[in-house]
Image: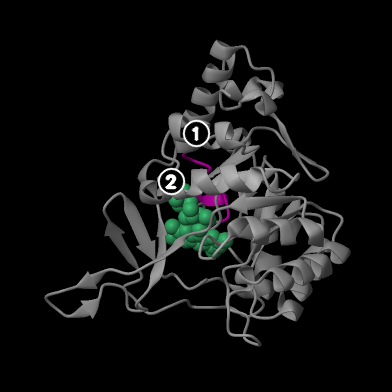
Amino acid sequence: MPAQSSGSLSVRVGNTELPTPVCVASGTFGYGAEYEQLIDLSSIGALFAKSVTRAPRSGNATPRLVETPSGLLNSIGLANVGIERYVTEKLPLFAAMPCPVFANIAGESVDEYLEIVERLEARGEIDGFEINLSCPNVARGLAFGTECAQVESLTARLRKATVRPLVVKLTPNVTDICEIARAAEAGGADAVTCINTLLGMVIDTENRRTALAAGTGGLSGPAIRPVGVAAVYRVRRSVSIPVIGAGGIMCAEDALQYLLAGASAVQIGTANFVDPRTVARVLDGIADYGRRNGYGCIEEFHLAE
Ligand SMILES: Cc1cc2nc3c(=O)[nH]c(=O)nc-3n(C[C@H](O)[C@H](O)[C@H](O)COP(=O)(O)O)c2cc1C
């Protein structure tokens, strides 16, 4: 029996039902259409699309990807077509997607986030929003996701602009991710995603240069999985909204760690570059584990006390 036929694995985020708990992470699955020959897109819980900003961005100079032990370091720099082309070129792709689609929004100011959310809220093609807080706030210099007051006020502004699910994606590059999660919840978020990439650097010692042209980048892949699982475990116990787990999920066993830590759903990121069918494999494994343990829904996937 295909795992995706199990209605009991569906998950609610805000007012939207994800048909399965296995989603794809922003920036690692394009706009979905690129994968339609490779995977049954209806088996995806939700597509979290690549971040969009107000203006088009060509991203950082190359090289902007380097492999690390069990990881990938990237400094793509939010390359994207900008909101104008997003509306004309990407929304039609989303309308054809057989799974929920969350637009992931990035910005350098509160007004930029707000303008994009308002623009998309007026349209019918997307099911919800994921807010990428890893961007620097030009007014304050620090990434949005590093200050509680900033996270709460941004979330509250965006909350007023949408009736759709509002998911706040947390950066792990903070002192206490639980405080930031509580700020997102206080601002009215329907869920939080844990975690975005970890700040990292690789140095080419022969050339005496950083491997990435931008110097630092974001570390993803199996190397960050224990960090992500711990973040989900702690955040789950700090907020009462659903937590979506992300970071280094390569197989069902990895996803199960997140679910047992308290995640209501997971996102597959870097693994999509290794095997585009990871989502299907992970979903089958979760369904099998649920059947073996007699679990009726995702909330029953818990750590033994
Ligand atoms: C190449 C690449 C591009 C990414 N682009 C984005 C992005 O545009 N917006 C965003 O919120 N996260 C982005 N991410 C972060 C992922 O969505 C995810 O949170 C992170 O990679 C951890 O999951 P993973 O280890 O399964 O990849 C990107 C990650 C990678 C590897």
Residue 90 sits inside the magenta stretch: no
- Residue 207 is left or right of residue 182, and the answer is left
What kind of element bears circle 1? helix
- Residue 92 is left or right of residue 141, and the answer is right
The amino acid on which the numbered mark 1 sits, given as a three-letter code, is Gln
Is label 2's Cβ within 8 Å of ligand 1?
Answer: yes
Question: Which percent across, then down, holds residue 230?
Answer: 51, 45
Q: Is residue 209 visible?
A: yes
Nearer to me, 26 or 242? 242
Residue at image position (45%, 41%) is 249
Asked which colour scheme the image uses, the reply is one colour
Which mark is drawn over residue 257? 1
Q: Which residue is mark 2?
A: 225
Q: Which residues are magenta?
A: 31-38
The amino acid on which the numbered mark 2 sits, given as a three-letter code, is Arg
When asked about the image quadrant of residue 185, the answer is bottom right
Q: CA distance from mark 2 to mark 1?
A: 9 Å
Kindly check if marks 2 and 1 are in contact, taking CB atoms under 8 A apart as contact.
yes
What kind of element bears circle 2? helix
Indicate which disc, 2 or 1, sits on the residue closer to the N terminus: 2
**Crowdedness near tag 1: few (<14), some (14–19) or many (≥20) residues, C-alpha within 10 Å:** many
Quarter of the picture holding the N terminus: top right
Nearer to me, 259 or 124? 259
